[in-house]
Image (tube, grey):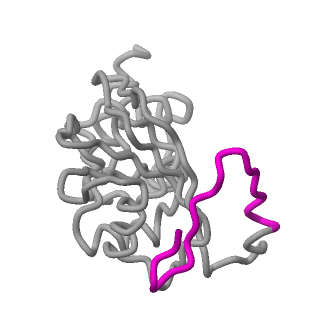
């Protein structure tokens, strides 16, 4: 199963593939996509992907990956592109806060630069209403607020730059400094109130 512009293949479910041995340790040419499909998202908060299965698509070329290549991958599974909703998951983020919609050319460019791994599909309709924001908003994201609170509680003198790096390590996504300063000041205030 390969498209004309790319050599990607769907891995047989029984096959194990050591990606480091296959692609090389310094690989920048290929990536593998973990594709969750045939199911639907259930519950929120504590979102889960219910039903469906997981397949791996190997040897996707970084340089040629595009909406067209992605659509050919979906078509190979028999899905109608017009009625399929696709979401990438930010590395290490939970499903509640880590989903990015894959709809526009820029979404695919960001996917290749930042994520390159997990994709979830919903078919005919979507249940996802809240996506991973382009700029993380602590006021409307209780998960991030809780994470920031735990970071400050363990280190009350943390600087905005240290917090930004810790959150970047967790979500692989840069955070607007002005918003983080505001959230960090407020969180430090909350932590100090609890300690009095």
- How many callouts does the rendering have? 0
Quick check: 12 above or below 190? below
State the residue in front, 179 or 111: 111
Relative to residue 129, is residue 80 depicted above or below? below
Q: Main secondary structure of the magenta part?
A: loop
Q: Is residue 130 magenta?
A: no
- Image side of residue 164 versus residue 84, left or right: right
Q: Residue at x 46, y 50 (%)?
A: 171
Q: Position of residue 166 (x, y in %)?
A: 53, 49
Residue 159 in sight from this viewpoint? no
In magenta stretch: residue 13 = yes
Can the viewer see residue 134? Answer: yes
The residue located at (34%, 46%) in the rendering is 121
- Give the position of the C terminus as an image quadrant: top left
* Of the pair 33 and 2, the residue shown nearer to us: 2
Residue 95 in picture, x, y percent from top left: 39, 36
Q: Which residues are magenta?
A: 1-21
**Along the line of sight, which residue is nearer the eye, 22 or 176?**
22
Residue at 46 percent of width and 65 percent of height? 114
Viewer-closest of 140 and 74: 74
């Amino acid at each position: 199963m390969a498209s004309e512009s790319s050599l990607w293949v769907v891995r047989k479910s029984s096959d194990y593939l050591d990606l480091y041995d296959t692609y090389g340790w310094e690989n920048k040419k290929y990536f593998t996509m973990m594709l969750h499909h045939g199911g639907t998202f259930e519950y929120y908060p504590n979102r889960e992907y219910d039903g469906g299965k997981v397949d791996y698509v190997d040897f996707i070329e970084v340089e040629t990956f595009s909406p067209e290549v992605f659509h050919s991958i979906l078509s190979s599974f028999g899905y109608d592109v017009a009625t399929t909703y696709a979401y990438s998951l930010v590395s290490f983020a939970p499903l509640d806060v880590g989903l990015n919609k894959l709809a526009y050319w820029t979404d695919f460019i960001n996917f290749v630069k930042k994520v390159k791994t997990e994709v979830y599909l919903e078919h005919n309709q979507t249940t996802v209403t809240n996506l991973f924001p382009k700029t993380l908003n602590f006021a409307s994201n209780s998960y991030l607020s809780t994470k920031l609170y735990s970071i400050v509680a363990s280190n009350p003198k943390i600087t905005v730059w240290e917090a930004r790096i810790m959150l970047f390590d967790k979500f692989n996504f840069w955070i607007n400094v002005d918003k983080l300063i505001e959230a960090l000041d407020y969180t430090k205030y909350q932590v100090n109130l609890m300690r009095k």
